[in-house]
Amino acid sequence: MFKWIPLFGGEVLMRTLFAALLLAGLLGWFLYGKFSGGSWRRATTDYLRALVVGLAAARAVEYIVFLPSYLGQGHLVRSWTYLGGCFWPGLAVGLATLWFFTRRRGDAPWPSVAAGAVTLTFAMAPVWIGALLDGSAWGAAGDVPWALGPGQYGVLVPLFAFGPAAAFMPGISAAYTIHPVQVYFALGCLLIGLGGVFLKKRLAPRPFSAVLVAALALLWFGLGFLRADDPVLFLGLCAPQIMALGGLVWSTAILLTEKKIRVNRPPTAG
């Protein structure tokens, strides 16, 4: 069993998820440099700026939305030193940061937003695999053939769910098998990312960004019903699902008001 990493005096994250986050950050930097089409120096500056601001927003919303429920259960594992965060605020603020600074520089902002969207989609795949390995963001009970047994909730950290996670799963017992929802999310992100690569040269940057966000929103909303780590807030929906609906509304509004969906291609000779 891996040891907890003492950081700023608190229990934070297992080494597996930390390594996955680091891998995701490096992968995102590489992909953004490729997809943005500009110089690596400019791409690195834009990427780091959006990454830092987006992560700060994700962490702040995570703290505000979920801390009361953690405190109410006397459970402080997800303290201010926790490295997680809410995906949707991070996505929104990160892409808005790309849009703002690219436009401020005098360049067209939506190509940068489109590159950031497809980059983040791919980068989320190793994050979800890290969540599988350390046992966080666990799935609901299920009896599918590929379900995880109690000793596999954290593949590299056996019985993790009976430690910190047990506080969030009332009635947890050794009889539970759960959906490997982290794998579902990782595969979904990869498929959406590959679809994004296919569509990137066929759609204009603004509708392309909207299509990608809509696909992520549907993924987060649908798989939210198979998660057991987030408390239900409203109408049987958890916070990520409600935020995903916001992303879907934004995407729909963009697509309905966009006049130019496809990229104009020059006619072929002959």
Image (cartoon, helix red, strand yellow):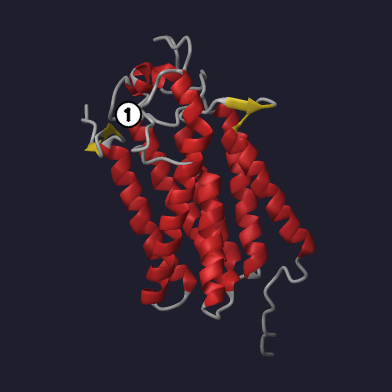
Q: In this orientation, does residue 146 appear?
A: no
Q: Residue 224 in the image: x percent, y percent?
A: 58, 33
Q: For the N terminus, give its image quadrant.
A: top left
Label 1, on which residue?
Answer: 155
Considering only vertical position in the picture, is 52 above or below 85? below
Question: Which of 8/132 is in front?
Answer: 8
- Inspect this view and state whether residue 46 appears: yes
Q: Secondary structure at mark 1?
A: loop
Q: Looking at this view, name the residue that lies furthest to the bottom.
A: 270
Could you say which quadrant of the image residue 136 lies in? top left
At 50% across and 62% down in the image, what residue appears? 116
Q: Residues within 10 Å of mark 1 (few under 14, many from 20)?
A: some
Seen at 46% across and 37% down, the residue is 63
Q: Residue at x 57, y 57 (%)?
A: 195
Quarter of the figure that contains the C terminus: bottom right
Under mark 1, the amino acid is Val
Residue 167 sits above or below residue 110 on the image: above
Q: Position of residue 221 (x, y in %)?
A: 62, 38
264 relative to 147 in the view: left or right: right
Point 57% across, 37% down: residue: 240
Residue 39 x/y as whole percent:
40, 78
Pick the front one: 248 or 147: 248
State whether residue 13 is above or below residue 265. Answer: above
Q: Count up the numbered dots.
A: 1
Q: Quadrant of residue 258?
A: bottom right
